[in-house]
Image (tube, helix red, strand yellow):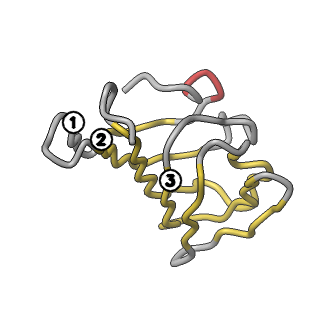
Amino acid sequence: MERRGTRAGHQYNLLGHLGQNGSGVVVEPYLITLTADSDIFPTFQHEGLEFLHMLEGSVRYRHGDTLYLMEPGDSLFFDADASHGPEVLEKLPARYLSIISYPEKGKRR
């Protein structure tokens, strides 16, 4: 799956996709893997909301001006309009779920 961040050596596996539906919300769940070949990239920005759940390894994840140490079992839920992404790769490989939701085009509220 090609997505912003792939150039930074981040592997994205799309786990499903809920597109056009009655709710007007698109949902994209990903499994993201970071390895020694991955770069830090704390400046992702996109519309919608994002939920992260750390499965393996550890990273210091930036959201806006704050860094969060993410270890297995930790979660973050945030507005994805702010700059965000892994800033320090503490223990690799790191794997986490990223579930992004945003308004379906043409159905913004």
Secondary element at tag 3 = strand
Secondary element at tag 1 = loop
Amino acid type, label 1: Gly
Find residue 40 and report its image quarter. Answer: top right
Residue 106, label in figure? none
Secondary element at tag 2 = strand
**Dots 3, 1 in contact, CB < 8 A:** no
Residue 96, can we see it?
yes
**Dots 2, 1 in contact, CB < 8 A:** yes
Q: Is residue 105 left or right of residue 85?
A: left
Measure the alpha-carbon separation of dots 2 and 1.
5 Å
Residue of label 3: 50
Q: Is residue 72 above or below residue 67?
A: below
Q: Give the crowd class for mark 2: few <14, some 14-19, many >=20 residues within 10 Å.
A: some
Amino acid type, label 3: Glu
Percent across and percent down for residue 97 are 43, 57
Measure the alpha-carbon separation of dots 3 and 1.
16 Å
Residue farthest to the right? 65
Residue of label 1: 19
The quadrant in which the N terminus is found is top left
Residue at left offset 60%, top offset 30%: 9
The disc, 3 or 1, on the residue closer to the chain's N-terminal end is: 1
Percent across and percent down for residue 50 are 50, 53
Residue 40, can we see it?
no
Residue at left offset 30%, top offset 33%: 107
Amino acid type, label 2: Val
Q: Is residue 64 left or right of residue 54?
A: right
Find residue 34 and report its image quarter. Answer: top right
The quadrant in which the C terminus is found is top left
Residue of label 2: 26
The disc, 2 or 1, on the residue closer to the chain's N-terminal end is: 1
